[in-house]
Amino acid sequence: MTQTIAPRVRTLVLLLLATAGLLLTTAGPASAHAALTGSDPQQGVVVDKAPDQVSLTFSEQVALSNDSLRVLDPKGKAVQQGKPFEVGGTTYGVKVHSGLPDGTYTVTYQVVSADSHPVSGAFTFSVGAPSTTSVSVSGETAGGGVVGWLYGFGRYMSYAGFIVLVGGAAFVLACWPRGAGVRPMQRFVVGGWLTLTSATLLLLLLRGSYTSSGKVGDIFDLDLLGNVLQTKSGAALVSRLLLLAAAALFISVLFGAYDKREDEEKRDLTFGLAIGGTVVAAGLAASWAMAEHASVGLQTGIAMPVDVLHLLAVATWLGGLTALLVALYRSDAPIEAAAVRRFSQVAFGSVVTLVATGVYQSWRQLGSWSAFTETRYGQLLLVKIGLVAVLVGIAFISRRWTAQLADTVVRQGKRAPQKERVAASASGSGKSAKESGGAKDSGAAKDSAAAKKAVGAKGGGSKRAAQLARQQAAMDTARQKRTRDADPHRFGLRRSVLAEAGVAVVLLAVTTVLTQTEPGRTEEEANAAKAAASSASSSSSGEAGSGAVTLDMSFDTGGTDGKGVVTVDIDPARVGGNEMHVYVQRPNGRAFDIPEVKVALTLEAKKIGPLAITPDHITTGHWSASNVQIPMAGDWKIAVTVRTSDIDQTTVSKNAQIG
């Protein structure tokens, strides 16, 4: 039975590991917390006079570098001058050369949000009249490429190392003190420490290139490293390294002095180790909370402690679960049912804490029920909730096996005295091992007699006796392991815990991607700010009777990559010739290209139209049409047909007062 089912379980875990890897490799660039909510000049606008500076407004404060804001002319030449500067609040600007000639200019930005994630994007505006441009912004993505992949891998390994280190140590200290002397358990916890330390050093080296150029050659740039050390993220990584030095001392005591103490002395040392270990573990968790999502936004004073509790609960549950798996599969020393039962209680408390803190984090990061399905963060959170539910279900099965294992141990304990009496009786009466039902013990007796004979026959037989003793010990260990593994209750527990660990690997991958994704609340607020700005622009244009009209329309063609926002600018929105610009963006605000965009104008009150317009493609996500003739003033219906593939298309429309 063991040989039949174990390969299936291993196959399941391999599939789960592959899924985790797929999640990490397809996560793409970080979708960060900060979002562009406005600019001056506005995106797509045509201004009569060249501006003195270009300013951008974000949803939160960001960190700037010398090349964070660039303005490029139609030939791709930079026309900004000086360093970017803070205009006020969350608005940042850069000066441009005076007397810019007419044409279309591209503004690119690459900044770092307050929660440590890089943010990048681009948009265009025109001076005098639009023109063709050679600037391509399709590659303007922060956090991508080889460096982005390595950084994501480092984040995953840092979380995994933290979970193994904290969860494994907590399992030994709170559930299985005998495990401090078990070599596989020692290697397990030390491996977690090494993984977290290595991953932290890797992140520290990658950080400068990750948030700026994204080039592999800049990983070892000392100037970039110096800049990183002056940021909040750099300080958090350095703090984590210092705390790992304290964690190394904790590990040496746990597997050194603690293991060598007697049971009564261990109890005295346990309290000190528990306090010290909790402080170090909380400090390590805080190194994430102080630099990521919890450190910005609503109620940061509450969010950061809650985030620390959340990480500690995850580590105690999943790390302890993996430690239990090591104890069941790799340890020669049998783990007691009482230890498994204690872990079950600790895991239950961790799950309760995980749910409570997770509910608060979900409310804080989403803000509305619609964000669950309409934002990437909400969709990933639903996947995470589903995986946690699966884990809890498997854990319930594990508790059943634990109870049956405990019953088996109790029954074996009751039969043990009777077996000892039978063995003593057989020894006293001089009966053979076979007659007393101890066939397995006869082999040991024969080996012992052979050892004694070897000692008596030859003075140097001590080596032979020692060899026989080692052989006998190995045979006894193998016999105990076969007996232990033959227990169906223990085998069932091993199988369910293995399945739990496999799901936990995928859960960790989803969590890693989630921490790099823009929270749903921020995404919705940014979209609302853009819509309000566009609405205000349209209203002011309508009141004045002339000026640019800007319309934002969300679309969903139903196909792959079929969601986005199409923006139509009509300038000067009056009777006669007009300039029309069409922009297509993803829900996160990034421009992208689609196969076809068509516009139709209809004045239903006068039964005019539809007037078909096919704009020309200018640059990524930007189409333009000049001399668009509007015959009379009125409430015109602007219909845009968007095609995202050979078969997927949709038409969206809005009305605008023109003339």
Image (cartoon, helix red, strand yellow):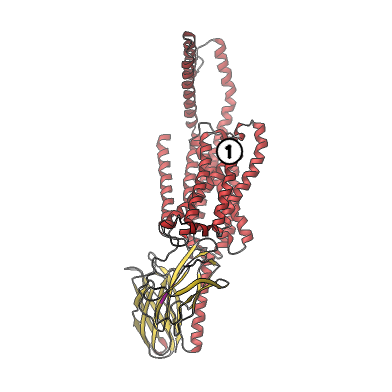
Q: Which of 592 and 494 is in front in this view?
A: 592
**Image side of residue 410 versus residue 616, left or right:** right
Instruction: Find the magenta span and give its range.
Output: 105-110
State the predominant SS element of the stretch in magenta: strand
| Vertical order, 463 against 214 (above or below) | above
- Residue at the farthest top position: 457
According to the image, label 1 marks what residue? 252
Q: How crowded is mark 1: few (under 14 residues within 10 Å), some or many (20 or more)?
A: few
**Image side of residue 620 versus residue 325, left or right:** left
| Vertical order, 537 against 12 (above or below) | below
Image quadrant in which the C terminus is located: bottom left
Instruction: Kindly state the secondary structure of the residue where label 1 is placed.
Output: helix
Residue 343 in percent (x, y) is at 58, 41
Residue 395 at least partly seen: no
How many marks are shown on the rendered structure? 1
Residue 580 in percent (x, y) is at 39, 81
Q: What residue type is labelled 1?
A: Ser
As for residue 121 lying within the magenta part, the answer is no
Residue 302 at least partly seen: yes
